[in-house]
C-alpha cells in the first residue's frame, strides 16, 4: 500500500496542433451560442413545435450525464468499497464528472428558452415531474462534485500560497483557510461521497423516466416502463469503460505511460455490468413483444440493432477476451464501443424514437446545433488538459513524488 | 417536514407499491366545463379561427380571408399565431363530404403538461381550463414532449422571453359565465359549451338517436383519462389525427414510477444508509492491523 504513487500536476506543453484544432472548434461553437442568445433558439436550431427537443437535450444533457457516470462508479469502488488499488483512476474520473456536469448545466442554459429563470426549480417545486427530479439532483450533485474536488485544490496550494505585491499580506490568511478547509473536508468527505453515489443513481434513472410521459409518441422499441432501470444500468455499465477510454486518451496525449494493470482490472468488471444491462434490455423486449418491430426495416429498427450489437454485444465479447484486456489499443476500442452504444441509446430514446402524431418531416440537427455540441466537447477536453497540468489529478506511473503536505487527502494515499 | 408527514412516511415505506399504483389524487372538479365538437355538423368555415385570434389579440386577417379553403391542402397545427385551426379530411368511403375537425388544446382532466412541467407552470383549474403561467415557465419545452395532442407551441424566434402558447379555453370569458369565443361564433352550432358531464349525456343521446350518423364513441370521454373537448364523428377517429390513447391518465405511468422511487424519500435514505454501512465495513477490513 505504501508504494502508492501520488498524483502530481503533469508538466507538458499546453499548445499542440491538436489543442489548436480543439480551440478552433470551441470558438466555432461559442459563436453559435452567442447567436442563440441574440437571435433565439429558432435561429440556430432545427427545433420546432413538432420536435421540441433535439441534439442539445439528447446528447449534451442526456448522454453527457451518462458519460460522466465514471465519477460515481469509481467513487463507489474506490471510496465506498475501499478498493485502494483503483485510487489512481478516482481523481481523473472525478475531474471528468465535474467538467461533464458543468457542461451539462451549460447545455441546459442554452437550450431552455428563459435561461435567466434556471433557478426557478429551486423554489417552484413539482414533485410529479421527472424533469424536476433530474434538475434538482443534477444541481445538488454538481455541488457535491465541486466539494469532492476541493481537496485537490487545497492539496495543490496549501503551504504554497505566495501572493505578490500588495496582496502578499493575504497569503497567510488564505493558507490558513485552505488548511481549515482541508481538515474539515477530510473529516466529512465520506458524507459527500455517499451522497454523490445516491444522487447519481437517482438522476441517472430519472433521466429515463423523462420520456415515459411521451407515451405513444415514443417508438415501442424504446418506450418501456423500465426505461429508468435501463438508464441506470447503462450508466453503471458505461462508468468503467469511460474511465479506461479517458485514461488511455489522457496518458497518450500527455505523453505518459498508460496504467494498463489498473485499467485491465477495471475492464474485468465490465462484462457482468454490461451483461446485466443487456439481459434487461432483451428481457424487456421479449416480455413486451416489441421484437416484432425489428421485422420491418426502418430507421428505428436499424438504430436499435446497431445500438445492441455494436454498443453492447460486441464490446461485451471483447471485454471477455484476455488478449483484449492486455492490450491498451483493444481496451480503447472496446471501451469506445460501449461509449458509442450508450451515446446511441440516448440519441435513440430522445431523438430517433420520438415521433409526433403530425410531422412535417424528420428532425435533423442543424449545423449550429452540431457546432455547439462539438464546441462544448472540445472545451471540456481543453479544460481537462489545463486542470491536470495545474492540479494534482493524474498519478504518473513509476514516478514517486515526495509528500507535499502534512494532511492526507482522500484519494492520494491509503 | 412536519411530524404528521414523517409518520405517514414511515407507514408508507411498507405500502409503497400500492400507493404508487393508485389513481392520481388531484381529481378534477365535478362541475368542470367542456365543449362538444360535432364534426358531422362542422362545415369548415373557420369562423372559430377568426374569433379566437380576435379574442386573444393575435394578428387577425379580415374575416373574408377565412373563407379560403385552399389552406385545407395541408394539415395544420395550432401555433403561436393560431390557438385553434380547422383541418379537412377527405372520405375514403365514397361520401363526397369531407370531414372538418377543429383542433385546439383538449384541456385534459389529468393533463400530461401539468404533471411534466418542471416548475408547475401549468394548472388544471376547477372550471376546466388548463392554464400556463408565464411568471414560472423556464422555457424547457417538456410540456411539448409530454402532450399527447401536440398542442403547446413555443416562440422559437423570440430570443428574450419566449412563451409557450396554447388555447386557454377563453378562461376570462368562462369566469364571466360566457362560452368560449369559438363556440359563440360557430354559425352551425357544431360546438356545444356546457358542463362536461352533461355534454357526455348529450353526446350519447345524439349517438343513440342517429346511430348511422355517428361512431359509437365520444372521443375524449376516456382517452388519456378524459378531456374537456369532446368529439363526435361519423368515422374512425384515428383517420382524423386524434391519437389512439388508452383510458389511463397520460401521466399515470410516469408519476407512479416517480413516486415509487421517491416514496417520501425512504428509498434514497435507505440507499444512503446501505452505502454508509458498506463503507464502514470495508474500511475496517482494509485498516492496517
Image (cartoon, grey):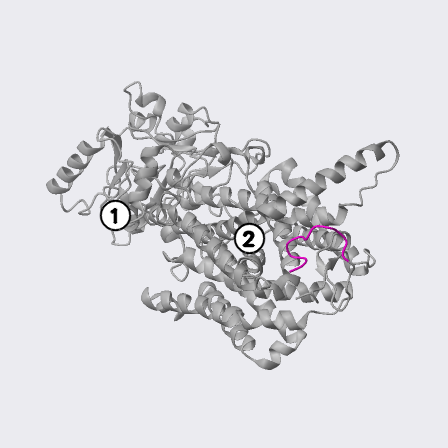
Q: Which residues are magenta?
A: A403-414
Residue A332 appearing in the image: no
Q: Residues within 10 Å of mark 2 (few under 14, many from 20)?
A: many
Where does the image place residue B285, in percent across and percent down from the top left? 53, 63
Q: Can you say whether B137 is above or below A349 in the image?
A: above
Closer to us: A369 or A245: A245
Tell me what residue is drawn at x 50 percent, y 67 percent.
A307
Q: Can you say whether A288 is above or below B84 in the image?
A: below
Residue that badge 1 annotates:
B247
Magenta span includes B287: no
State the SS at label 1: loop
Where does the image place residue A342, in percent across and percent down from the top left? 53, 62
Where does the image place residue B287, in percent across and percent down from the top left? 58, 61
| Left or right for B285, reference A219 | right
Chain ID for label 1? B
Magenta span includes A411: yes
Q: Nearer the viewer, mark 1 or mark 2?
A: 2
Residue that badge 2 annotates:
A65
Amino acid at each position: 500500500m505504501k508504494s502508492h504513487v501520488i498524483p502530481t500536476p503533469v508538466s507538458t506543453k499546453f499548445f499542440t496542433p491538436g489543442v489548436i484544432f480543439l480551440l478552433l472548434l470551441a470558438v466555432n461553437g461559442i459563436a453559435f451560442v452567442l447567436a442563440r442568445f441574440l437571435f433565439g433558439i429558432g435561429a440556430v436550431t432545427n427545433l420546432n413545435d413538432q420536435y421540441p427537443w433535439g441534439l442539445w437535450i439528447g446528447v449534451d444533457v442526456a448522454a453527457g450525464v451518462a458519460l460522466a457516470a465514471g465519477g460515481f462508479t469509481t467513487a463507489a469502488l474506490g471510496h465506498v468499497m475501499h478498493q485502494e488499488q483503483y485510487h489512481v483512476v478516482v481523481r481523473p474520473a472525478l475531474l471528468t464528472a465535474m467538467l461533464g456536469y458543468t457542461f451539462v448545466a451549460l447545455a441546459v442554459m442554452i437550450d431552455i428558452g428563459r435561461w435567466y429563470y434556471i433557478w426557478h426549480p429551486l423554489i417552484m417545486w413539482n414533485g410529479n415531474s421527472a424533469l424536476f427530479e433530474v434538475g434538482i439532483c443534477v444541481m445538488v450533485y454538481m455541488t457535491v462534485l465541486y466539494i469532492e474536488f476541493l481537496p485537490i485544490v487545497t492539496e495543490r496550494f496549501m503551504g504554497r500560497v505566495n501572493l505578490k505585491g500588495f496582496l502578499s499580506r493575504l497569503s497567510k490568511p488564505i493558507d490558513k483557510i485552505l488548511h481549515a478547509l482541508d481538515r474539515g473536508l477530510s473529516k466529512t468527505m465520506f458524507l459527500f461521497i455517499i451522497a454523490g453515489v445516491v444522487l447519481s443513481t437517482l438522476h441517472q434513472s430519472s433521466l429515463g423516466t423523462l420520456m415515459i410521459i411521451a407515451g405513444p409518441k415514443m417508438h415501442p422499441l424504446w418506450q418501456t416502463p423500465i426505461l429508468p432501470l435501463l438508464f441506470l444500468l447503462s450508466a453503471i455499465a458505461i462508468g468503467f469503460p469511460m474511465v479506461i477510454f479517458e485514461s488511455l486518451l489522457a496518458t497518450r496525449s500527455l505523453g505518459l505511460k498508460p496504467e494498463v494493470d489498473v485499467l485491465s482490472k477495471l475492464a474485468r468488471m465490465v462484462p457482468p455490468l454490461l451483461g446485466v444491462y443487456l439481459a434487461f434490455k432483451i428481457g424487456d423486449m421479449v416480455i413486451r413483444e416489441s421484437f416484432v418491430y425489428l421485422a420491418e426495416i426502418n430507421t428505428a429498427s436499424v438504430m436499435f440493432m446497431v445500438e445492441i450489437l455494436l454498443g453492447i454485444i460486441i464490446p461485451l465479447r471483447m471485454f471477455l477476451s484476455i488478449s483484449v484486456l492486455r492490450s491498451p489499443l483493444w481496451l480503447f476500442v472496446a471501451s469506445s464501443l460501449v461509449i458509442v452504444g450508450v451515446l446511441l441509446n440516448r440519441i435513440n430514446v430522445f431523438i430517433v424514437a420520438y415521433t409526433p402524431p403530425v410531422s412535417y418531416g424528420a428532425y435533423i440537427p442543424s449545423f449550429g446545433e452540431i457546432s455547439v455540441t462539438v464546441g462544448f466537447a472540445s472545451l471540456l477536453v481543453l479544460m481537462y488538459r489545463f486542470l491536470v497540468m495545474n492540479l494534482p489529478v493524474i498519478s504518473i506511473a513509476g514516478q514517486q513524488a515526495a509528500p507535499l503536505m502534512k494532511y492526507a487527502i482522500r484519494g492520494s494515499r491509503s | 417536514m412536519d411530524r404528521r408527514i414523517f409518520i405517514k412516511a414511515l407507514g408508507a415505506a411498507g405500502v409503497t407499491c400500492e400507493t404508487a399504483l393508485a389513481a392520481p389524487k388531484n381529481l378534477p372538479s365535478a362541475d368542470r366545463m367542456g365543449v362538444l365538437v360535432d364534426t358531422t355538423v362542422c362545415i369548415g368555415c373557420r369562423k372559430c379561427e377568426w374569433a379566437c385570434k380576435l379574442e386573444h389579440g393575435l394578428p387577425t386577417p379580415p374575416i373574408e380571408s377565412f373563407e379560403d379553403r385552399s389552406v385545407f391542402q395541408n394539415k395544420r397545427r395550432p401555433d403561436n399565431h393560431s390557438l385553434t385551426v380547422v383541418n379537412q379530411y377527405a372520405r375514403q368511403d365514397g361520401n363526397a363530404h369531407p370531414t372538418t375537425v377543429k383542433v385546439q388544446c383538449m384541456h385534459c382532466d389529468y393533463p400530461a403538461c401539468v404533471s411534466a412541467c418542471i416548475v408547475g407552470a401549468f394548472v388544471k383549474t376547477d372550471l376546466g381550463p388548463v392554464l400556463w403561467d408565464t411568471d414560472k415557465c423556464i422555457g424547457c419545452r417538456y410540456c411539448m414532449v409530454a402532450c399527447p395532442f401536440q398542442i403547446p407551441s413555443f416562440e422559437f424566434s423570440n430570443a428574450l422571453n419566449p412563451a409557450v402558447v396554447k388555447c386557454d379555453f377563453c378562461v376570462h370569458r368562462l369566469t364571466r359565465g360566457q362560452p368560449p369565443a369559438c363556440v359563440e361564433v360557430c354559425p352551425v352550432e357544431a360546438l356545444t359549451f356546457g358542463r362536461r358531464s352533461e355534454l357526455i349525456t348529450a353526446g350519447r343521446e345524439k349517438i343513440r338517436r342517429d346511430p348511422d350518423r355517428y361512431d359509437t364513441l365520444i372521443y375524449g370521454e376516456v382517452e388519456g383519462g378524459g378531456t374537456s373537448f369532446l368529439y363526435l364523428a361519423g368515422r374512425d377517429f384515428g383517420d382524423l389525427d386524434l391519437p389512439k390513447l388508452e383510458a389511463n391518465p397520460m401521466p399515470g405511468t410516469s408519476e407512479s414510477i416517480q413516486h415509487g422511487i421517491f416514496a417520501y424519500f425512504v428509498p434514497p435514505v435507505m440507499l444512503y444508509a446501505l452505502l454508509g454501512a458498506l463503507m464502514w465495513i470495508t474500511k475496517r477490513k482494509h485498516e492496517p492491523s
